[in-house]
């Protein structure tokens, strides 16, 4: 989903709380935002009780009543489903404030996304991603679970040839809160020269290098231990039925 300004998101959520349909919200903000994006932005919004009645009244003004009610009813059900998920898993999410649980989450993130220890090549380990949330989770968990030293961290914007590295760096600074002086020179992929970027909301990749081998080894050790705990008996196989 494209990133929208905070004031616009607040405006959209306010209009939805007041019972406006997605079509009405599009007209009010005067921006052609996909309804799928509006649904995501408003996923936790609780609609007023009279919302269905409003939709029924709108349908009498020339809209297809049956189709409109079905579509809006499905949206309401979907939004309720997401609200229920939030309510169900909010206590689980709070468990990440525990150092032990945070280390488990961080070790799993690094198992899938971070570079692996190699004493011959690097004195740091790195993690790169195009999703700012992954970068923020990585840094926040490092800070929470270990004696974090920000001076051991460096950031590098990796982008395509037709992108503006300065604009991208501003985006990543705003998204992650990493100070500008910790950024290396951007890396431009020369293989993309002459090949326009098709995804208009693609903001490149941010790679984080953290110069602490001890932290890397601890996380890799924990990931191995978790794998061993979860591994099924060899005779059962990885997809055995129980």
Image: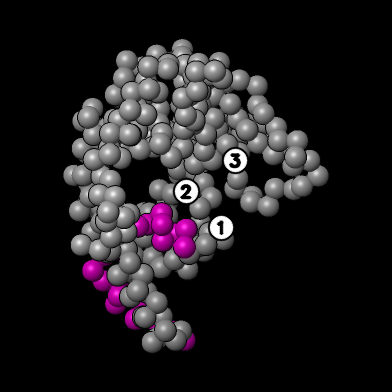
235 vs 139, nearest the viewer: 235
Give the image location of residue 106, x and y in percent: 34, 33
Disc 1 crowd, CA 10 A, few/some/many (<14, 14-19, 20+): few
120 in the magenta segment: no
Which labelled disc corresponds to residue 31? Answer: 1
- Nearer to us of marks 1 and 3 is 3
Please give the name of the residue rendered at 41% of the width and 61% of the height, measured from the top-left corner.
Answer: 39
Give the image location of residue 67, x and y in percent: 42, 84
> Is 56 on the left-hand or right-hand side of 94?
right
- Nearer to us of marks 3 and 2 is 3
Which labelled disc corresponds to residue 203? Answer: 3
Distance between mark 1 and mark 3 Cα atoms: 21 Å
Residue 9 visible in the displayed image: yes
65 vs 67, nearest the viewer: 67
Q: Which residues are the magenta region? A: 36-62
Q: Secondary structure at mark 3?
A: loop
């Amino acid at each position: 989903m494209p990133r929208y300004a905070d004031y616009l998101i607040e405006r959209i959520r306010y209009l939805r709380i007041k019972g406006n349909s997605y079509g009405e919200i599009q007209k009010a903000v005067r921006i052609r935002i996909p309804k799928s994006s509006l649904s995501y932005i408003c996923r936790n919004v609780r609609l007023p009780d009279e919302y269905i009645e409003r939709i029924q009244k709108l349908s009498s003004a020339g809209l297809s009543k049956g189709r409109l009610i079905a579509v809006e009813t499905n949206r309401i059900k979907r939004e309720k489903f997401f609200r229920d998920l939030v309510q169900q898993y909010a206590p689980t999410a709070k468990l990440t404030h525990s150092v032990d649980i945070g280390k488990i989450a961080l070790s799993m993130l690094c198992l899938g996304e971070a570079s692996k220890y190699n004493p011959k090549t690097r004195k740091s380990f790195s993690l790169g991603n195009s999703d700012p949330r992954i970068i923020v989770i990585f840094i926040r968990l490092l800070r929470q679970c270990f004696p974090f030293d920000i001076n051991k961290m460096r950031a590098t914007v990796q982008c395509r040839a037709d992108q503006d590295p300065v604009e991208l760096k501003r985006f990543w600074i705003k998204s992650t809160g990493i100070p500008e002086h910790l950024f290396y020179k951007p890396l431009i992929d020369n293989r993309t020269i002459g090949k326009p970027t098709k995804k208009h909301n693609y903001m490149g990749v941010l790679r984080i290098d953290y110069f602490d081998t001890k932290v890397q080894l601890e996380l890799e050790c924990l990931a191995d231990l978790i794998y061993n705990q979860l591994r099924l008996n060899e005779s059962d196989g990885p997809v055995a039925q129980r």
